[in-house]
Image (cartoon, rainbow, N blue to C red):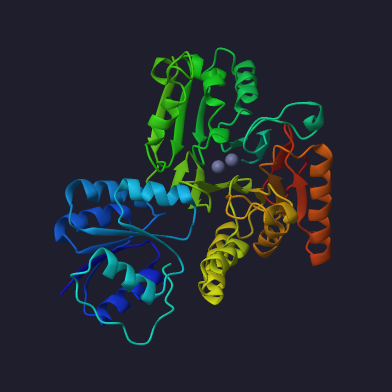
Amino acid sequence: MPTVLLIEDDDESRRATSDLFSRDHWTVFEAGDGEVGIDLALKHHPDVILCDLLMPKANGFQVCRAIREQLQPTKIIVISGRDYGVDRTSALEAGADEYLVKPITWDLLSSSIERILPQVPRKPAPGNNGAQFHTPSTRIKLWGVRGSIPVPGPSTVRYGGNTSCVEIRADGEIIVLDAGSGIRSLGIALENEFGERCVKLTLLITHTHWDHIQGLPFFLPVYNQKNEIRVLGYEGARAGLGKILAGQMETPFFPVSLRDLPSNIAIEELKEMEFEVGAVQVRAKFANHPGICAGYRLTTSGGSIAFFPDNEPYELLKLYIADRDHTSREDAQEFARTERQKLVEFLFECDVLIIDAQYTDDEYQRHIGWGHGSLSRVVSLALEAKVRKLILFHHDPSHDDEKIDEMLERARFLVVESGSPMEVEAAREGAEVWLAPKLAPARL
Ligand SMILES: [Zn+2]
Ligand SMILES: [Zn+2]
């Protein structure tokens, strides 16, 4: 009997797929995360491995690399909800034989297996042809709110031109979300505030696109040996976090290398999707964005904050792909609904949501598949998740202050129309939000 290993962290989806293979007389092994997947692959040498892309412990790219190094004949099919060219290329470079985009039907799957592994005898599975794979007070301060590239200048004076960086002070911790160009001003402020004292902070990186890490070489605290800086993030598509952060500081890009920085910097790759920074609980969820990109939800004693600086809602994207590829619109819609529900659950009743709202609805029509959000989709997501305060983030570099005013007005109109009490703001450099238990006075 042919053997298949399913590596997928969504139990329901993995079981549904397992049933299909079993009915088709395959021996099935199952793994709920990438590390277990690698172990089972090396133990059982399956004919085919179906591997999800976004998983805890080891992502699909890491699984492909690890398995490909040691198991040549095994065929690997990477399954992903995303259809970004860069993901497909990275998966194939990492050793995958095939890259399929969810939702997956049995017909598509079995024809792919037949193509890459023609010697395995198989029969169609009966029935199912539409299965899916599937502080006392807390202070938030925005130091960089822009996406893609810094755009300082007269047209961006009010909202700011620096790229992604948010500081959270809660429960005795300083947590910095992303190291875009906004982190430069934060570094100066921290050194002024702490003087000779140690600045101890945790930098949580969502992903290593340049607009989220480009400020690190200009972050003053890394140049002082009194400071302790912990950098956390998930491995990227092609290289480890440490390697990427060091890469942007190598000659000829920068005169000082990361290893020569005098402060105590510890770079740690995250494996788990839930962890703690001191007393702050952190949960992570992978975003729909090219490469490996996470969003975080921080639970502090003052309230909860979710940060999704780069994320594209699935709804229109999946329909667009279905129409383009002449695949089932119903399956596409079902997949998008399921993924949206997971995100709604992740964000449910958070006090502050800082999220990618880069495009107007019209602009989004021309940027479907670019990995960013659109205004009305983001508002409806926040409403459904019963978020208390929505902060529109990752402003497009082409948007001047007036354009962002217009988008904010539109977002507020949509919220009023819905009857929800949710507050909406557009992220503004230098703005602060304070959260306190029970009472949550906010100013932005
Ligand atoms: Zn970005
Ligand atoms: Zn990005």
Task: Give me the residue at 62% from left, 55% from top.
Answer: 368
For the N terminus, give its image quadrant.
bottom left
Residue 175 visible at all: no
Q: How many marks?
A: 0
Q: Quick check: 21 left or right of 318? A: left
437 versus 77 height, above or below: above
Kindly tell me whether residue 338 is visible in this rendering: yes
Q: In the image, is residue 73 above or below residue 196? A: below
For this rendering, which residue is in front, 47 or 113? 113
371 lies above or below 150: below
Residue at 33% in and 87% down:
126
Residue 10 in the image, given as x and y percentages of width and height: 40, 65
Which residue is drawn at the image coordinates 67% and 53% (left, top)?
A: 366
Q: Quadrant of residue 153?
A: top right
Left or right of residue 88, residue 380 in this image: right
Q: Position of residue 419 (x, y in %)?
A: 81, 66
Ligand 1 picture quarter = top right
Q: Position of residue 235 (x, y in %)?
A: 40, 41
Q: Nearer the viewer, residue 349 or 260?
A: 260
